[in-house]
Amino acid sequence: MKGLRRAWPRTMTRQLGVLLLLALLASNLIAMLLLQRTGSLVHPLSRTLVVERLATAYQAARDLPAADARRLLDAMGTADARFWVASAAQVQPFAMHTEERRLATAVRQRLGLADQAVVVLQLERSSGGPAREHLFKRAGWQALRLRSSMSLPDGTQLNAEQAPAGAYEWGRLLAYSVPVSTIPVLLIVIFFMRRVVAPVKRLALATERVSRGEWIAPLPLSGPREAQELTLAFNVMQERIARHVEGRTRMLAALSHDLNTPITELRLQVELLEDPELRQDMLDSLDELRAMVSETLDFVRGDAVQEATVEVSLSEVLSDLARRYQTLGTPIDWPGSAPVACRCRPLALKRALTNLIDNALRHGGDAQVRLYREASGGLCIEIRDHGPGIDAAWLQQVFEPFVQLGKGGADPSHGGGLGMGLAIARACVQAHGGELVLENRTPGLAALVRLPG
């Protein structure tokens, strides 16, 4: 069953083609079964020839002297037919089947004989088995044989053996009907299925790109009406999402501008305070408030900025970051790796990785960076430190904006920023269609950035 599932095609066009091919083969098989059980076994032309030969032989045996009749019957004999006169009937009377009765009736009519005239015909296979043998038995594919006996006026019997052509020579019929009935239908179906599937496939690719945070030009409306309606709905959805993000960014930008004015005024008023300790405490609070406003705006702008998505080597991206930290005097452990291509927004991804590396250096004292491909086929960037880690209850909460590692969730001695680094990093990774998770190690903490392969 698993082998069948692996062999089953994945695309809609190929699946429909295979199903249609199976349906056509099944229809031919059903037709073969029905015709084998109910259809005529003898070809119409061969049936006419059989009747004419029997009529000619009967007239010769009846009207000519015995010696002349014998020579004529011998002359009529061929590789597939034999006629002779004998005192005993080769075929004894029996309850003939429908096709045998039709042949007997045709012989009587051809000779003008009464219905009481003894004309017995037995249709069978060349092996002597039933003429209507099961289709899937080898005997059902053997040649036909017609044995007959007719009473002559002098009491003798005209016996005959003939090999009529079958009405359905399945080998030839299938060799003709299957290609003729299958190939044109498959070609037409594949043509129209491609016309139907192409817009859906284009829409799927566009949806995957949008899920990575890209904005793309409106898709053209093509294909059947349903495909056009689906494409139109996608275009409208993308336009509305873009308007929503742009509106939110503008609103928060305006809010940031409006908040900076009273913060500046408060700072001027605080500068006039005489108590230096109180003045410094309030100035620190105002600086923190200004930083929070700035970080919030940067977080929202990260969703709105539309950096072009390109294919880059993650190995080179990480090598660039390692050189940057080397220059700053805080080297990270990056052994390098083989080139691994990935479609991403390089600046946004670097920003997310920088936040994670900074967290590792700040809270763990070191940063080990590894790049590898997971068993599922996706890419994973692991950034690990050897610090105290995070309490398991806080592994998810630290992704919330303004949740600081230095307050409540970790040892305060390790400090902390404004609590936006992990939130920005996760938003960036999710915009690339990936995920960011934190795992405690022994010792330390590992940030796993999983990206589509």
Image (cartoon, rainbow, N blue to C red):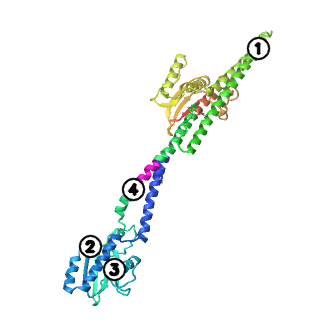
Element at label 2: loop
Q: Residue at x 39, y 56 (%)?
A: 180
Front of the two marks 3 and 4? 3
Q: Nearer the viewer, residue 448 or 17?
A: 17
Q: Amino acid at mark 3?
A: Arg
Q: Nearer the viewer, residue 120 or 33?
A: 120
Q: CA distance from mark 2 to mark 4?
A: 32 Å
Mark 2 or 4, nearer chain start: 2
Element at label 1: helix
Q: Which mark is residue 180?
A: 4
Where, by quadrant of the figure, is residue 391 drawn? top right
Element at label 4: helix
Q: Which residue is mark 3?
A: 110
Q: Residue at x 19, y 83 (%)?
A: 68
Residue 151, image x, y percentages: 31, 86
Q: Which mark is residue 80?
A: 2
Q: Main secondary structure of the magenta part?
A: helix
The correct choice, above or below, for 323 with respect to 276 in the image is: below
Q: Amino acid at mark 4?
A: Val
Q: Amino acid at mark 1?
A: Glu
* Mark 2 Cα-neighbour bin, 10 Å: few <14, some 14–19, many ≥20: few
User: Does the stretch in magenta take in 184?
Assistant: yes
Q: Which mark is residue 265?
A: 1
Q: Which residues are magenta?
A: 182-190
Q: CA distance from mark 1 to mark 3?
A: 123 Å
Mark 1 or 4, nearer chain start: 4
User: Does the stretch in magenta take in 411?
Assistant: no
